[in-house]
Image (spheres, rainbow, N blue to C red):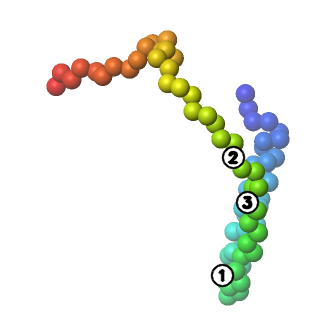
Amino acid sequence: MGPTEKSFSQVKAILGKLDRSIDEVRARRTTGDLKPFPVPPAAPAPLIAPATRTPEPPSNRQNSPYGRATPLPFGG
C-alpha cells in the first residue's frame, strides 16, 4: 500500500517550507544581513495540575502467561 495523497501533500509542503528557509538563510549570508530569526512566543504553561493516583497494592498474582523471569544459567 502506497502513501496517500494527503500524506504526500503534507511532505511536499514541509519540503517546500524547508527549501524557502534554506534560500532565506543563504540570501542573508551572502548579503551580510545578519538579523536574528524571528522566534515564536513560548506557549504558556498549562494551568491544569496533574491528577494524583493512589498506589496499587503489590500483587502476588502472575500477570504474564509465561510466569516470572528467571536468570539464564551461566555456562561459560
Q: What secondary structure is found at the residue carrying circle 1?
A: helix
Q: Is residue 1 above or below residue 53?
A: above
**Amino acid on which disc 2 is placed:** Pro
Return the mark for residue 50: 2
Position of residue 69 measured from the top left corner of the image (x, y, whole percent): 38, 20
Residue depicted at x 46% and y 17%: 60
Position of residue 5 measured from the top left corner of the image (x, y, whole percent): 83, 39
**Amino acid on which disc 1 is placed:** Arg
Q: CA distance from mark 2 to mark 3?
A: 13 Å
Residue depicted at x 45% and y 13%: 66
Q: Would residue 24 be visible to someone looking at this image?
A: no
In this view, the residue farthest toward the left is 76
Residue 44 sits in quarter: bottom right
Dots 1 and 3: beta carbons under 8 Å?
no
Q: Which sits earlier in the primary sequence, circle 1 or circle 3?
A: 1
Return the mark for residue 65: none
* Location of the C terminus (image quadrant): top left
Residue under label 1: 29
Q: Would residue 34 be visible to someone looking at this image?
A: yes
Q: What secondary structure is found at the residue carrying circle 2?
A: loop
Rate crowding at label 2 as few (under 14), some (14 to 19) or many (20 or more) other CA atoms within 10 Å: few
**Amino acid on which disc 3 is placed:** Ala
Q: CA distance from mark 1 to mark 3?
A: 35 Å
Position of residue 2 measured from the top left corner of the image (x, y, whole percent): 73, 32
Residue under label 3: 45
Q: Is residue 71 above or below residue 11?
A: above
Q: Which sits earlier in the primary sequence, circle 1 or circle 2?
A: 1
Q: Nearer the viewer, residue 67 or 18?
A: 67
Residue depicted at x 78% and y 42%: 7
Q: Is residue 72 above or below residue 40?
A: above
Q: Nearer the viewer, residue 54 or 16?
A: 54
